[in-house]
């Protein structure tokens, strides 16, 4: 099955995205192309990352004219808000989810591997290994949401409840199954079916339906669709193993801590993700990843 790598990014993550690209070029095989999805205002900045297998995609090619970015006055213009007539202002991380869903409906490849821009591949990885006998690896971890801290747990359950509403799942209203990870494979035919179900359920375009609320997790929508709506066991091979080890919270990591983190991958893991808001320097990550 043909596979494309997709990354939604923005100018604040440019150097981390550059690291991702370098690690893909050095260590990743088995894919047709790498698509980086950005806001129109970031196109010129990201074009320096383009190459023979890497394309920079303008979000205007993916999203409707009624959803457009504007400077956020509360941040003195440093951040962006996406405004529409169909719902509240959306943040960049909401719109990145919409871009990923939109690109999955336009590409010819059967598999889309979504990779966050603050991920670095540390081991050789064949994207083709995500599919076998016509089935694509499907990440889910049952009961995992119940084990996280209360604030995050409530947020995950709200995402699950909204996914159920969009998909027309009568019961249960939400589940504690975790579907979110930073290195995630989707079937593009499943995304097409998911969108058709949302439109049949809401009598709206899928984008209008999703943009109506900030309670949004595209991974949870996809996951609940596969688990509770699709009824196609021939399409997916469930797995609770995360391919990427992630540093989610805490202060900036130093050189020694990064080296320990990079060498601490589980046998099945091929990449590390250092969340950008931790403030860990890209140059330190580059050296720890062996890309310097």
Image: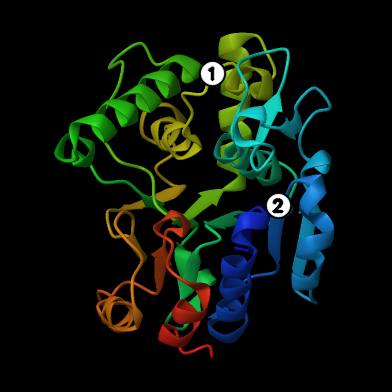
| Residue 79 % position (x, y) | 64, 40
Total numbered badges shown on the rendered structure: 2
Q: Quarter of the image for the C terminus: give it.
A: bottom right
The circle drawn on residue 37 is: 2
Most foreground residue, 235 or 164: 164
| Residue 218 % position (x, y) | 50, 36
Let me know if residue 176 appears in the view: no
Quadrant housing residue 122: bottom left
Most foreground residue, 148 or 244: 148
The residue that disc 1 covers is: 213
In the displayed structure, does residue 73 sit left or right of residue 238?
A: right
The residue that appears at 75% across and 31% down in the rendered structure is 70
Quadrant housing residue 270: bottom left
Against 181, residue 164 (above or below) is: above
Q: For the residue labelled by badge 2, is the local secondary structure a helix, a strand or a loop? A: strand
Let me know if residue 174 appears in the view: yes
Q: Quarter of the image for the N terminus: give it.
A: bottom right
Specify which label sits upstream in the sequence, 2 or 1.
2
In the displayed structure, does residue 114 sit left or right of residue 207?
A: left
Q: For the residue labelled by badge 1, is the local secondary structure a helix, a strand or a loop? A: loop
The 10 Å Cα crowd at callout 1, few under 14, some 14 to 19, many 20 or more, is some
């Amino acid at each position: 099955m043909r596979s494309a790598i997709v990354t939604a990014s923005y100018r604040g993550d440019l150097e981390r995205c550059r690291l991702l690209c370098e690690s893909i070029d050095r260590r990743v095989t088995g894919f047709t192309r790498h698509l980086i999805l950005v806001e129109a205002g970031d196109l010129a900045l990201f074009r320096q990352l383009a190459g023979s297998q890497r394309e920079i995609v303008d979000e205007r090619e993916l999203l409707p004219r009624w959803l457009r970015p504007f400077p956020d006055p509360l941040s003195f213009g440093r951040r962006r808000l996406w405004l529409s007539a169909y719902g509240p202002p959306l943040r960049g991380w909401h719109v990145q989810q919409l871009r990923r869903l939109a690109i999955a409906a336009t590409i010819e490849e059967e598999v889309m591997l979504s990779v966050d821009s603050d991920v670095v591949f540390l081991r050789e990885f064949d994207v083709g290994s995500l599919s076998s006998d016509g089935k694509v690896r499907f990440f889910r971890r049952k009961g995992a949401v119940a084990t996280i801290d209360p604030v995050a747990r409530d947020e995950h359950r709200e995402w699950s409840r909204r996914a159920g509403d969009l998909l027309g799942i009568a019961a249960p209203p939400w589940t504690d199954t975790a579907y979110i990870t930073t290195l995630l494979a989707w079937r593009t035919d499943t995304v097409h079916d998911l969108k058709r179900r949302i439109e049949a359920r809401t009598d709206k375009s899928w984008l209008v339906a999703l943009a109506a609320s900030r309670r949004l997790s595209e991974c949870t929508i996809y996951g609940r669709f596969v688990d509770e709506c699709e009824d196609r066991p021939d399409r997916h091979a469930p797995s609770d193993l995360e391919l990427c080890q992630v540093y989610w919270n805490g202060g900036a990591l130093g050189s020694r801590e990064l080296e320990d983190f990079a060498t601490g991958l589980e046998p099945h893991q091929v990449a590390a993700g250092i969340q950008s808001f931790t403030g860990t320097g890209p140059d330190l990550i580059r050296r720890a990843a062996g890309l310097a």
